[in-house]
Image (cartoon, rainbow, N blue to C red):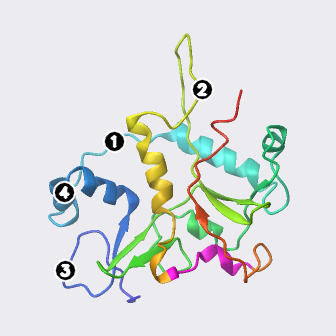
Amino acid sequence: MASKRHRGQYDSNHPAPYEISRGKIETFVKCPACFWLDRVAKVPFPSIPSFNLNSNTDKLLKRDLDKYRGKSSHPIMSYYGYNHLIPFEHYDLHKWESSLHFGVDDSYFNTIHHETNLLIGGGLDDVWIDTTKNILHIVDYKSTSNQSNNPVPVSLDGIWKGFYPDFTDTSKKPHNRQKECLCRREENSVPSSSKVPLSRSVSQVSVVPR
């Protein structure tokens, strides 16, 4: 990877892989012209207010899970029969959670798509390990509210919720070239000889029965 990162405004003469997030890929799929204006012409999209409540919920949830990280399942997970899922511990986890700096080096959560010279990456909410199958699950925490008199269970049904599985699919390493998941470097958490695929998984916290 070149010492000078290629991000922000796209430059076709820049030798380094161009850093692009899942969100920008989704923008291209929805509106290629909008993507070109944003990434090439540098015409920014209108900004929207930040979701402070959602962000704080994520922080509090992760802070609570950190008490059990690498040790055991969270009590509420055990109560609902998910005691085989444990918050994954790794010395680079704070880097994987950094959405703004994913392109710094390969210790962050990214992968190069060599055919297009794109460095695809982003920040994760969390990683859990299934101790029965030795599989890592990418977890995305979401906050929701339902003020209906007849609320329905939380699920991934609905057109606007297609973003969630798309996110976790983007978080998987490509099968071609067989680049190993960065999570495998921690020999104390996952044996180095183990093949640990990244599973398409969305946080189960939001869908357990109430």
Residue drawn at the location 55% of the way across and 34% of the way down: 155
Q: Is residue 10 above or below residue 143?
A: below
**Mark 4 in CB contact with mark 3 (< 8 angstroms):** no
- First in residue order: circle 2 vs circle 4: 4
Magenta span of residues: 178-186
Residues at marks 1 and 4, CA–CA distance in whole angstroms: 21 Å
Residues at marks 1 and 2, CA–CA distance in whole angstroms: 28 Å
Question: What percent of the width, then of the height, locates residue 12?
Answer: 19, 80
Q: In the rendered image, which quarter is residue 19 located in?
A: bottom left
Q: Which mark is residue 32?
A: 4
Label 3 CA crowd tier, 10 Å (few <14, some 14–19, many 20+):
few
**Mark 3 in CB contact with mark 1 (< 8 angstroms):** no
- First in residue order: circle 1 vs circle 4: 4
Residues at marks 2 and 3, CA–CA distance in whole angstroms: 47 Å
- First in residue order: circle 4 vs circle 3: 3
Question: What percent of the width, then of the height, locates residue 32?
Answer: 19, 57
Residue highlighted by disc 2: 153
Is residue 43 visible in this depiction of the protein? no
Q: Is residue 158 above or below residue 189?
A: above
Residue drawn at the location 74% of the way across and 59% of the way down: 130
Secondary structure of the residue carrying numbered label 3: loop
Three-letter residue code for mark 3: Ser
Residues at marks 4 and 3, CA–CA distance in whole angstroms: 17 Å
1 vs 2, front mark: 2
- First in residue order: circle 2 vs circle 3: 3
Residues at marks 3 and 1, CA–CA distance in whole angstroms: 30 Å
Residue highlighted by disc 3: 12
Residue highlighted by disc 1: 48
Label 4 CA crowd tier, 10 Å (few <14, some 14–19, many 20+):
few
1 vs 4, front mark: 4
